[in-house]
Amino acid sequence: MKAIVLMKQTPDTAQLSASMDGLKLMAEGGPRIVNPWDEYAIETGITLAEDHGGEAVILTMGKPEATEAIKTGLAMGCKGATLLTDDAFENSDSLATARILTAAINQMGDYDIILAGKSAIDGDTAQTAVQVAALLGVPYLGYVAKIEAVDFDAKTITVVRAIDGGRETVTSPLPAVVSVLKEIGEPRYPSFMGIRKAAKAKIPEMGLADLGLSADEVGAAGSQAQWLQVTLPPAQESTLEVIEGEPEEAAKILVQKLLAEKVI
Amino acid sequence: MDFSLTEEHQMLKKAARDFAAERVRPLIREYDPLHKFPRELLPEMAEMGLLGVCIPVKYGGAGFDYISLGIVSEAMEWADASVRETIAVHTALNSLGIFQWGTEAQKQKYLVPQAKGEKIGCFGLTEPDAGSDVAALNTRAKKVGDTYLLTGEKMWITLADIADHFLVFAKTDPEKRHRGISAFIVERDFPGIQTGTIEGKMGVWTSNTGWIRMDDCEVPAENMLGEPGEGFKIAMSCLDNARFTVAAGAVGIMRACLEASVAYAHQRETFGKPIAQYQLVQQLIANISQRHDIGELLVQKVGWMKNMGIRNTRETSLAKTYCTEAAFASASDAVQVHGAYGYSSEYDMERHLRNSKAAVIYEGTTQIHQLLQAQYALGFKVDKPLRRELPPYDAEVWG
Ligand SMILES: Cc1cc2nc3c(=O)[nH]c(=O)nc-3n(C[C@H](O)[C@H](O)[C@H](O)COP(=O)(O)OP(=O)(O)OC[C@H]3O[C@@H](n4cnc5c(N)ncnc54)[C@H](O)[C@@H]3O)c2cc1C
Ligand SMILES: Cc1cc2nc3c(=O)[nH]c(=O)nc-3n(C[C@H](O)[C@H](O)[C@H](O)COP(=O)(O)OP(=O)(O)OC[C@H]3O[C@@H](n4cnc5c(N)ncnc54)[C@H](O)[C@@H]3O)c2cc1C
């Protein structure tokens, strides 16, 4: 079994404050982390490798600093990684990013499953994975909460997807691109042995020429979307109201109010 | 001179700190009022490699260096002293003792499962009537054929009710004072050993502290660690390693106190201003900050000396005394910054204050360390080379 985990390095948005220039933080500043949603994809890949044999490898498009996040994934238990990096890749939108990732996947030989997070906490379009699937011409299973069954010999997978207002269980042929949710399973901590191996690891890099792409397919030139500004949502005014009285009475009033506000 | 951490150290620090913040601290907040030992953390710590962090890979450890032992100790005690105590006792006092003094067979039998965290070790030196005065210990070991029969009582032993393996010190030659002490690896299953837990401690409520009673406890002669009469030297070298974790842990308490006090000072307002604006509050915070940084430097130096294989009994003792007293003072200052809320278990400060008092007592009281410092300074004490030194760190050898 071979799983390719699409992992993005993102800024730690928890560090964002209203006074910061969002675009600048995204581009250069602040501590960088593994996109938290991608930790679930990494966990899924490692668990599949443990349960079925084989390996999970990481594929990242990003700046050279992204090796730091890649090493976290290696320390968790991924067996290899490739960093796609080139000045020409800068300012790629999700489609251009997907093009770059797809070009690399097409050079990686046979694979059984491609795993992604539900979205990236910075760009947050949730489009990259679905675009990768489209470009590869393989099925896309988005927002997967659980893998019910997987048979890598028969090349099928059955998953539970979160959909608006419910869940659906679907079976799909493999290979497929699967984006996962939190419910898939808590990511493990990097093991100390894993850290020692990862710290020493040399991460192979590929650029524009290696991928056989042209400059107008990637970066700003190859992108439809442009980001003009990044800011925190304005702080919301909130009011606090304490309902006095006996718990039973107070609960009734609370229900009335929630109904009136259309919360329930 | 280079103060920067290697990439490996930085990754370790992040992993250990994440684990402390996400797993350890929430559990301790829940268990501390219940005086409950967080047993479920042991398999998790084992899985990560926390319990054998600086033991070579070939002996079941994670193969990191001694600086890393300090890094994880600091990270754990930021959450709570009790989890760092587990590392101090299991990894430093017991496992590193076997690593330094054990035969190959002892290492295979005891160190390997301990470094993997499959078995837990503890350290039984103190007795009801012998704490600072180690040479006064009363536990006897009588040789009968291929077996030693151990009789006596150990008191204030961390992990007494949890451990599988006990590193126990007993007199093989009661006529001699410290030269008559020998060290033994005792298994919980050996006939004639009993343990229990001590209740009513001021702090470290989530740590298990207890007693060990041995009544003609049968220990195979091959389980003697080192040579007959070498027990005192072994105990002191084990303490050189554990005191390093105690010092590093105390820096973790100071970091926790600093973070919490800074956050609280910005947020709490009196007389129309955040208390961070008042110079008397600033002084409390400046003191914590200063002690933290001094402590960190002392710990870093000792970690480096251990890596280089330089004898560090004096420097370790100094770091231990300074850092533990500084942590106690800082926890007290942090309670003060928090006012009445600091006195409440709603914040962690009162727990750190209670916990930090233990560390100025165990692993040599402050007074005993001050005597030691004076003896070094006055030339009354000079360290002689040991028959077996703690090996300097070598990444190749550690695997
Ligand atoms: C500051 C900033 C400036 C930007 N500027 C521009 C711009 O000028 N023009 C423009 O068009 N777009 C721009 N973007 C968008 C940016 O290129 C997208 O973030 C990126 O293409 C991926 O889309 P996303 O972040 O929405 O990821 P999502 O589609 O939300 O991510 C879903 C999943 O896809 C995978 N994935 C996403 N990105 C990667 C990656 N790089 N490597 C590996 N796997 C990945 C991960 O598994 C992730 O969980 C900008 C973004 C930021 C934050
Ligand atoms: C929470 C906790 C965990 C512990 N865990 C362990 C463990 O795992 N293993 C273990 O073996 N022990 C353990 N101990 C025991 C600890 O190491 C001893 O308590 C410590 O060595 C002090 O001994 P004592 O309590 O007998 O005090 P005493 O030696 O009786 O000292 C009493 C007081 O007299 C002072 N004093 C003594 N002698 C002198 C002197 N010559 N000059 C000046 N002042 C002096 C001391 O500083 C102290 O203030 C633990 C203790 C605690 C509190």
Image: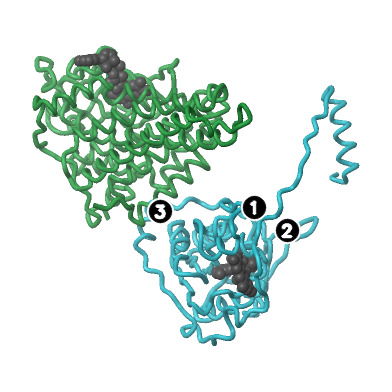
Chain colours: A cyan, B green
Name which residue lies at 59% across and 35% down.
B267
Residue B181 visible in the shown view: yes
Residue A116 visible in the shown view: no
Nearest the eye: B115 or B383: B383
Relative to A235, is B177 above or below?
Answer: above
Q: Which residue is mark 1?
A: A183
Corner quadrant of residue B356: top left
**Quarter occupied by the C terminus of chain B:** bottom left
Q: How many numbered marks are there?
A: 3
Name which residue lies at 10% across and 27% down.
B381
Corner quadrant of residue B99: top left
Cα distance, mark 1 to mark 2? Answer: 10 Å
Nearest the eye: B397 or B278: B278
Chain letter of disc 2 in the image: A
Q: Residues within 10 Å of mark 1 (few under 14, many from 20)?
A: few
Q: Which residue is mark 2?
A: A162
Relative to B299, is A220 above or below?
Answer: below
Q: Are marks 1 and 2 in contact (CB under 8 Å)?
A: yes
x and y percentages locating residue A145 in the rendered image: 67, 57
1 or 3: mark nearer the eye: 3
Q: Which residue is mark 3?
A: B11
The amino acid pointed to by label 3 is: Met
Marks 1 and 3 on same chain: no
x and y percentages locating residue B355 in the rendered image: 42, 25
The amino acid pointed to by label 2 is: Ala
Q: Secondary structure at mark 1?
A: helix
Q: Secondary structure at mark 3?
A: helix
x and y percentages locating residue A190 in the rendered image: 45, 53
